[in-house]
Image (spheres, grey):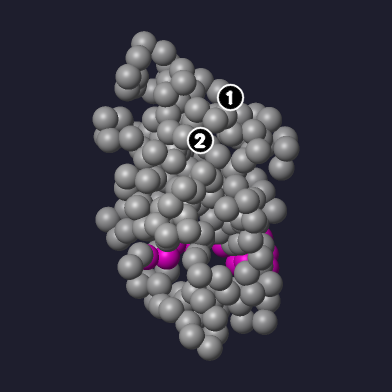
Amino acid sequence: MDEIINQSATKQPLTRCYTGTVAELLTFKSTEFPEHLKWQALSFMRMYYPEGFKGEERHRDWVTREEDHPIHIVLVEGNILLSHTNVVWKYLEHDTETYKAYGLTGVFTYPPCRGQGYGSQVVAAGTAFIQKSDADIAMLYCDEDLHDLYGNHGWQHMDRSTSYIGTKEEPELVDDEILMMLFLSPKGQHGQAAFKSKPIHFALDYTW
């Protein structure tokens, strides 16, 4: 894993968004994510995902939960954050098997920089990171209009799958986003049919 992370800082020949500086694609462990980038990410999230900053989380100062082992992949111009995603992972029990499930979350591009391929660049980098990892499967949830963004990078739309969060006694259906997956290891590939036909249950109150 460290070998992948250490191959992090590579300049990309992308269209400049704000400055004359060439955009860089960088990868960070959560504990090494620079403060100035973390707060830019949080500022975006607070504006666009306000439901994650209410009640007890009103003063939230983290981008992604540490228990999900986040890796930050970003495009920057100098000190300015252009685009971001997190690679995360957890163990997921499904149909008598336990899978090491990776995912993408926190995918965004600042509005002035959209339409230039930045989102596709971080999704490609996050997908490549997962494909080189020890993942059995990978999962992400997104709005339906983002289907092609992820589908262009090999993610499969699981249109017949159902997902639930919360306790098994009082499960809550995840019906506001579509599920897309990768089946990577032999175990993951063998379980593909079960993921298509049997409900997926996250024991916590969130997916990623």
Q: Is residue 99 above or below residue 22?
A: below
Q: Is residue 188 above or below residue 18?
A: below
Q: Label 1 belongs to which residue? A: 9
What's the amino acid at mark 2?
Lys
How crowded is the residue under tag 2: few (<14 C-alpha within 10 Å), some, or many (20+)? some
Q: Is residue 185 above or below residue 28?
A: below
Where does the image place residue 42, in percent across and percent down from the top left?
44, 41
In magenta stretch: residue 93 = no
What's the amino acid at mark 1?
Ala
Q: Residue furthest top?
A: 20
Where does the image place residue 195, in percent across and percent down from the top left?
52, 75
Q: Residue furthest bottom?
A: 169
- Residue shown at the point (48%, 82%) measured from the top left: 171
Looking at the rendered structure, the secondary structure element under dot 2 is helix
Asked if residue 195 shows in the view, the reply is: no
In magenta stretch: residue 181 = yes
Q: Residue furthest right?
A: 2
Where does the image place residue 150, in percent across and percent down from the top left?
40, 51
What distance separates the C-alpha of mark 1 from that of mark 2? 17 Å
Sequence-wise, the earlier of marks 1 and 2 is: 1
Q: Is residue 188 above or below residue 53?
A: below
Q: Give the side of residue 116 with respect to residue 9, left or right.
A: left
Q: Label 2 belongs to which residue? A: 38
Q: Give the side of residue 58 with respect to residue 190, left or right.
A: left
Residue range in magenta is 178-190
Q: Which mark is residue 46?
A: none
Asked whether 183 or 53 is in front, the reply is 53
Asked if residue 6 shows in the view, the reply is: yes
